[in-house]
Amino acid sequence: MTVGQWLDIWLATRHTIRPATRAIYTQHVRDYLKPRLGNVVLAELTIGRVQAMFTGLLRANATRARPLSAATLQRMREVLRAALNGAIRRGLITSNPARWVELPSPRRPRPVVWTDARVAVWRATGERPPLAVWTAEQTAAFLQFTGQHPLHPLFHVAALTGLRRGEALGLRWCDLDLDEATLTVTHQIQERDGQAVVCLPKTAASGRTVSLDRSTVALLTRLRASQLQAGGGAPDGWVFAHENGQH
């Protein structure tokens, strides 16, 4: 059996991973692992072969329009390591050569605030920080600007609660307790092959209860009343949906 054949089998048997995770695994296998290691006999895969693949990818960064980041290379190694661990459990190999590969350590960008000075530089040059957050004033200005937009309630809840996009989209009315001013994250919605898929939160800690301020409770109360009037707003219906409660 070749590495490529095993990677196909391993991917096909990943039944419990989330759609977004599967998409990342599939991309790494399709675009990088199989083209460079796919023809190698699985039992003959060595640390040197795996290290050579990653060294080649690092050298190719010099000519790439969008070089592969250290974080991407680390994720790629984790995909290969997970697949080879599966091969060990099947008795196909006895050790995991991906475990010992050396890669550059990823540097996580530090978030910075969109100060007036940074905004001025961005407007003048197009330069922007890798990760920047709005000030309270900027957030308020955005929410005021989008006040008449159909998605304003979604923007409002995401901005004031810190929910991920998929978590906010996955909210149902039964997840909200407007009397107690709380919401509980129980699901999220992700995109898979152009289709919306309902799945569990990203981690166990993501299934949390969040307190709501008065303005958010008032906004959600009005939103539900509007949905009920249009025939939606059922307890198991989506909070952020068309007026009839459909996504």
Image: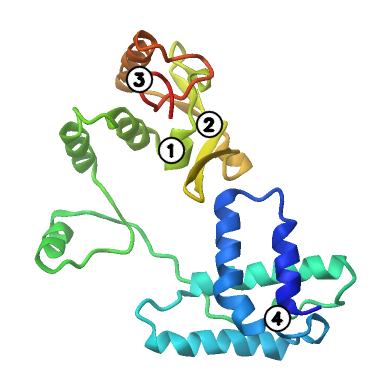
Residue denoted by label 2: 185
Q: In the orientation shown, which residue stands out farthest toward the right?
A: 91
Q: Is there CB contact under 8 Å for labels 2 and 1?
A: yes
Amino acid type at image mark 1: Leu
Gap between marks 4 and 3 measured at Cα: 54 Å
Q: In the orientation shown, which residue stands out farthest toward the top?
A: 229
Gap between marks 2 and 4 measured at Cα: 38 Å
Other residues around mark 1 within 10 Å, as few (<14) / some (14–19) / many (≥20)? some
Amino acid type at image mark 4: Trp
Q: Is there CB contact under 8 Å for labels 3 and 1?
A: no
In terms of sequence position, does the residue under pointer 2 or pointer 1 come before the other? 1
In terms of sequence position, does the residue under pointer 3 or pointer 2 come before the other? 2
Mark in front: 3 vs 1: 3
Query: Which image quarter holds the N terminus?
Result: bottom right
Gap between marks 3 and 2 measured at Cα: 22 Å
Tag 1, which secondary structure? loop
Q: Is residue 12 visible in the rendered structure shown here?
A: yes
Q: Where is residue 218 in the image (x, y as percent from the top left)?
A: 31, 15
On residue 100, which mark appears? 4
Residue denoted by label 1: 163
Other residues around mark 4 within 10 Å, as few (<14) / some (14–19) / many (≥20)? few
Residue denoted by label 3: 243
Other residues around mark 2 within 10 Å, as few (<14) / some (14–19) / many (≥20)? many
In terms of sequence position, does the residue under pointer 4 or pointer 3 come before the other? 4
Q: Quadrant of residue 25?
A: bottom right
Mark in front: 3 vs 2: 3
Query: Which image quarter holds the C terminus?
Result: top left
Tag 4, which secondary structure? helix
Residue 129 is left or right of residue 206, and the answer is left
